[in-house]
Amino acid sequence: MAKMKEKVIAPEYIPEKGSHVLTIDKEKYLIVNDAMYTFYQRSKGEFSPFFLGIRDDKKILGCKCTKCGLVRCPPFLTHCPDCNFAPTKIVEVGQVGKMLSTPPITYFANSLFLKMAPYGRGRVVLQGADTALSVNVYTTTGILAPGIIKKGTEVKVVFRDERNGEISDIFCVPTKELTKAQVAKKGLLASQINWEGAVEPDLKKPTAADKAAYGKALKEIKSVIKLMNQTERARKDIAGWKRDIKVKTTGGEFAIIINNGDIKLEEKKLTKPDFVVVARDPKVLADGLAYRGAITDSIIMKRLWISKNIEFTTIFKLDRMARSVARSKK
Amino acid sequence: MSKRVGIVGAAVTPFKAKWNEKTYYELAQMATREVVKDAKISIKDVDSVFYAIYNDIFERTCIPEHPLQGLIGMQDKFGMRVSTGGATGAYTISAAHAYLAAGRFKTALVLGVEKCTDCFDFLSMSATPEVIKTIGWSGDSFFEQQLGWTAADSYAEVVLAYMDEHPKDLKPQVTAKISSLLSQYVKNNKFAQRQHDQVTPQEVMNSRLIVYPFKELEICVYTEGAAALILAEEDTAKAISKNTGKPVIWITGLGEANEHSFAGKKQKVMPRIMSDYLASHRAYKMAGIKNPMKSIDIVELHDAFVHQLEITMSEFDLVPRGNADALIDDGLMLPGGEYLVNPCGGLIYCGHAVGASNVMSAWSARNELIKRKKKTALVHGTGSTIAQYTAVCILEHD
């Protein structure tokens, strides 16, 4: 059940020992790879019933004040501060609830959660509870876009198949994306839901107009990429970064190669790209690279498609380069 | 009876995205050197130091202030650190004021410093995701950190809850105009990280979503730097002022409030920033301000996010709640309007060196009160999860 073989710090996060010299105004400065880390064997203390309930019994527990009757979930108190510290008692709450307010969606995550983005995090008031539980929210239909989950949206708690007694062992999805049986099921597992996979969009057979649009967009993208290479700030944005990107459009296909400060466009079909971008209309990508709208937003709004969500990191870098070129022109 | 306390010196270091040339030791000393120069006193004349440093992990040490005590010439004297998230600087001013008002000291150094972009993510080969992660350790460690809690997503929770209640307010065109306006103000701040980064409203609208509903050009930028103030009780302040020829800027009002960090019935009221409301109104009461719309000339507001700036202005009762867009639509914060808001460019353009940020804001408010010969300014700090903490200072021209 628990992910016993995982390390508390994934190996890919751990940098190698090393140092380098940075020269600024002819002065040398020493930069050293470093870390500050502490390991814990930390008790969940009075929260143990709550986390054990999630891990072992697929239950959500709250605490009820014996005086005012307020049910707090999560059960973060043994005594109620509003009732002169009257004791609370543990109660089970429902696994369906409503969003207290519209949840934010994180597209640019912190380094530990880059693989998880985009994700929503909001607060659900579960049936039988008065306070809100902080949870991740997902859609089963692909990338979470604004408007899918809002204030008052009914959601269902879903349990991950592998659980370790952590708050991240559960998340919520809208009940309208589930069957009645799934909504009614206590302890619904993630594996019992049909998640729409990342299906590459089909491209129609190109017309002459598509080919002309491709040629026009390609010309502009080449020109922008040339500018990016000439802009020191933009080159810094992709320092230490390497990616081979396959770009498919209705009118044709090309590659964008990022290699540690260099970016180039090659008119070839990559056989082993790091990821694929599909732009039915290549102008959308050209607009993004030319700083006429963010590429990130085009993906969120489904005007562009990428094969791996983790590659939002690369997309952010491309958006950043577009802005760097714009800034350098000022 | 408590003593009057005023600001008699202020200084900042350049705010930069990254100071490879200096550690936080040197940044702290730089600001100290400049502030005693501004007040025309010796560090030997300063009785106490109050450090505004937010995050131990940024400085890569616990008790980050301990090496500074001797390095700034304050050995063998009183030294105390305050750490209250984004509100650290404003709370530190409040703490220093309390000691001076109580008569414990005649002078105090308020010293804010932060060095955040030493943090580095080796996977994306950039600093920002690791900076956000470091701030992410500030989220609730049992119920939120593991969900990818960030400062941005927690403030976005409050903003979206406000927008649930007031769907016609905080229009994207207005938030874009505010950001663009701040980018114009920053041209006059030679210490700012983005002094030369002027943007149009259209550029703001076109910038990418970071955390819905925040776009890249609507969010403060992480910065490294330091800022310092010299505070003094009335007699000492007047003597220093006579020597410098600069007026005393009196601290006439202070207010603070920290809300619940959980939400729901009898918890945090999500569509509101009650901490901003309570702290500002406590400060108004202390300063004897009955009509803030008439009294406040300059606002140096902790603009972590443009949307939050608008909500905070409404909690200050400087614009109606539910129609905060009047800041632009009715010209309240446009040049020539009722208030001058964030003439330093705010944290979005000057930069957010967390512990130093509100101290920098007080530096700017003092400069503007003197330069523009205005009467009253409000300095604000907000912090912690879901805008939980606030401290507000009212400054008045002599």
Image: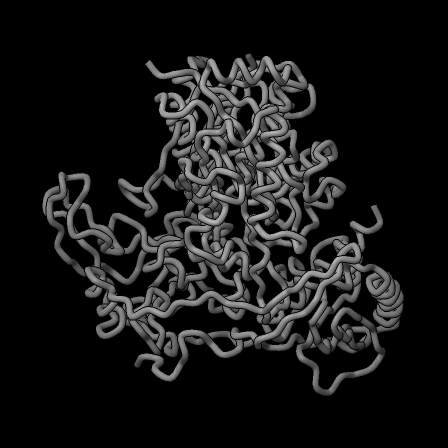
Residue at far bottom of view = A271
Question: Is residue A126 positioned above or below B72 on the image?
Answer: below
Residue A296 occupies quadrant:
bottom right
Q: How many marks?
A: 0
> In this picture, is B103 found above or below B37?
above
Depth check, front residue: A123 or B65 = B65
Way the structure is coloured: one colour
Residue B8 in the image: x percent, y percent?
55, 22
The image quadrant that residue B327 belongs to is: top right
Residue A200 in view = yes
Which residue shows up at 66% across the image and 38% down it? B179
- Residue A210 placement, left or right of B357: right
**In the displayed structure, does residue B221 sit left or right of residue A149?**
right
Classify the position of the N terminus of chain B by image quarter. top left
Locate residue A284, reporting x and y percent: 75, 61
- Give the percent coordinates (x, y) of residue A82: 19, 39
Instruction: Give me the residue at 39% from left, 67% from top.
Output: A38
Residue B293 visible from this viewpoint: no
The residue drawn where x is 44% and y is 29% is B47
Q: Residue at x 67, y 53 (%)?
A: B21
